[in-house]
């Protein structure tokens, strides 16, 4: 049994996880969640710690519809109707301005 297999099986057992792809050579695991899941990043990190590994970073991709409320961009997450307030990334402020041009459209936001 490989280390990647151990992490893969553990993550797949989490309720709300749709699929998992683990690459220890690349040093990452891609976890796709089911719509309406209640999985948290700390929950996944704890599980990975329990398997003997130390996560270093998490990147989240969220699909939703862009809206502006009181001059602030918000993302209405598909499937959950949860609303996230978006803030400009200091390292890429232009992306926030470009996002404002896509109000009402479905987009994917990376955080």
Image: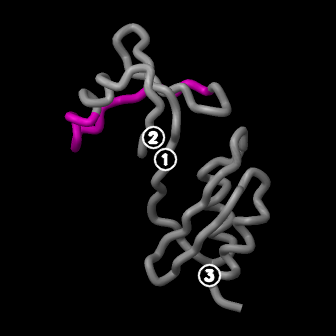
> What residue would you read off at disc 1?
61
> What residue would you read off at disc 2?
108
At 66% from the left and 75% from the top, the residue drawn is 7
Circle 2 Cα neighbour tier, 10 Å, few/some/many (<14 / 14–19 / ≥20): some
The quadrant where residue 78 appears: top right
Alpha-carbon span between mark 2 and mark 1:
6 Å
Task: Estimate the x, y position of residue 90 in percent, counting from the top left.
Answer: 23, 38
Circle 1 Cα neighbour tier, 10 Å, few/some/many (<14 / 14–19 / ≥20): few
Question: Nearer the observer, disc 2 or disc 3?
Answer: 2
Q: Are marks 2 and 1 in contact (CB under 8 Å)?
A: yes
Task: Estimate the x, y position of residue 109 in percent, counting from the top left.
Answer: 43, 40
Magenta highlight range: 82-95
Asked whether 62 or 101 is in front, the reply is 101
Q: Is residue 8 left or right of residue 97?
A: right
At 69% from the left and 42% from the top, the residue drawn is 35
Alpha-carbon span between mark 3 and mark 1:
22 Å
Question: Total marks drawn?
Answer: 3
């Amino acid at each position: 049994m490989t280390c990647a297999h151990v992490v893969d099986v553990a993550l797949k057992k989490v309720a709300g996880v749709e699929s998992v792809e683990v690459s220890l050579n690349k040093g990452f695991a891609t976890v796709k969640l089911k719509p309406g899941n209640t999985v948290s990043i700390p929950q996944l990190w704890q599980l990975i710690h329990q398997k003997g590994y130390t996560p270093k970073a998490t990147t989240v991709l969220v699909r939703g519809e862009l809206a502006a409320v009181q001059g602030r961009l918000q993302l209405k997450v598909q499937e959950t109707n949860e609303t996230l307030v978006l803030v400009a990334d200091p390292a890429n402020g232009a992306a926030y301005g470009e996002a404002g041009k896509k109000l009402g459209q479905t987009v994917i936001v990376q955080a």
